[in-house]
Image (cartoon, helix red, strand yellow):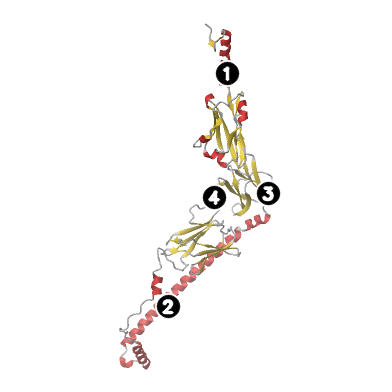
Amino acid sequence: MLPQIDGLSLSPVKVFSILIFHLLIHLNRAESQVVGPHQPVVALVDDDVILPCHVEPAEDVTAEILEWTRSDLNPRFVHVWRSGQDLVNTRNPSYRGRSSLFINELKRGNISLKLSRVKLSDGGTYECSIPLMEKKSFVKLVVASHAARSLLISLSGTDENRGGVVLQCESAGWYPEPELLWLDGEGNLLSAGPTETLRGPDDLYTVSSRVTVEKRHSNNINCRVQQKQISKSRETHKHVPDEFFELTSCSAAPIVIGLAVSLAVSIILILIGVFFIWRQNKTNVRRAHCDACKEQETANRPETDKTERDQEQDKLMSQDIVPPDTSKPPPEKSQTSFEEQNKSGSANHSSKTGDITVVEVEKNGNYIFLKNTSSENKLLSGWKLKLQINNRESATYEFKENFILKAGETLLLRQDAVSKPIKTDADLLWMNMVNWNVGDDVKIDLISNTGEEQMLLKNKIM
């Protein structure tokens, strides 16, 4: 008996045709692929971007379930299409109102995703999938920042061992993390120190590096910061005058001479000090011996043999001795004196500055080490540190309220820089602290809370 549909009988040929038709549809769907781009997609912050994804061969996917996801998110759904509509409530909150599909293109198999107002956090790998077809593809999105805020080459110091000058290059405001290169005037790469990288709270990177430039290099030095992923770079250059190299080559002799002179002067001062101490001790011994001889002679001399002058001195001495008046009570300490003696808390508030000394001054102007050499804690509220470089106008920095430097302990003062710090265990960070370099005259004064000023250092940094 032939099968019937709605009262109509179907011939075996028609039944066979229908089966073949459905089989071809199934085979066609089995061969369909979800295809994405082979290269990462690059977008700038605050721009709109399209993540390409489509079905090959093209077919209508309007009635399918379409999903865009990121495995590193929770929830992982970026955009979901089901039953002919967007499911907004299933999306990750950070994408709501910023993701959309091209509805009119779904019938041609285009399931690309549009992201609006791109953020740095949007960077990552996305999965484009049709779950019922068990087909999926991946799209990598790279989000880059706009032009970096700064790129600067500065003179950091000198390298006496190699007879060159040290340059530092620093640039901020990059994303993704860039690389920093040094080149000479002919475009040849220079061997430099490791690149220091710092990532700020805004997820942007700051990079810096130092290089020693010798006389054999050309005087034009270039610093290049680049991001290979997005083919983006910035470059700046600096001309190093010949005078810098001449100063570097001649600087070793004065240092050696200065050290020799300082050593000779120190030895002479020590010998003079030892001589005066020996002479003073010898004088004291001789004086004590003479006084003892005089007392012995006076004791052995009869009373009748005393001279008229001795008798007069005895009379004057007897008149000077006055018995204490026990009828009057001893004077009481004033209330002000009592309060001043009890003002000390957990630390000494003395204005004496001589107990604070300089232990170390970093030659490139990054930090200062101080030490409390006394046996008492020092409360540095209201104290100030005054820095003066090369007789320029001095800059003053005040210690924070209730800051205590304990007895025998050291204090590390460092400037707050964007680059990776040389000393990471600083006790205090001072914004925009004046900087110095090797060869600068540095003067450091400490001012107490009572205005007493003490010079801690006045020397040329070597």
The x and y percentages for residue 154 are: 62, 53
Secondary-structure class at tag 2: helix
For the residue marked with disc 1, what is the amino acid?
Ile
Mark 3 vs mark 1, foreground winner is: 1
Question: Are the residues tagged 4 and 2 within 8 Å (C-beta)?
Answer: no
Residue beneath label 2, please? 283
* Residue 218 numbered mark, or none: 3
Label 1 Cα neighbours within 10 Å, binned few <14 / some 14-19 / many ≥20: few
Q: Which of marks 4 and 3 is nearer the N terminus?
A: 3
Secondary-structure class at tag 3: loop
Q: Which residue is drawn at 54% across and 50% down?
A: 420
Distance of label 4 from label 1 (alpha carbons):
62 Å
292 left or right of 413 in image = left
Residue beneath label 1, please? 25
For the residue marked with disc 3, what is the amino acid?
Ser
* Residue 410 numbered mark, or none: none
Q: Which of marks 4 and 1 is nearer the N terminus?
A: 1
Q: Residue at x 46, y 59 (%)?
A: 410
Secondary-structure class at tag 1: helix
Q: Which quarter of the figure has residue 52?
A: top right
Q: In this view, does 249 lie above or below 61?
A: below
Residue beneath label 4, please? 420
Q: Earlier in the sequence, mark 3 or mark 1?
A: 1
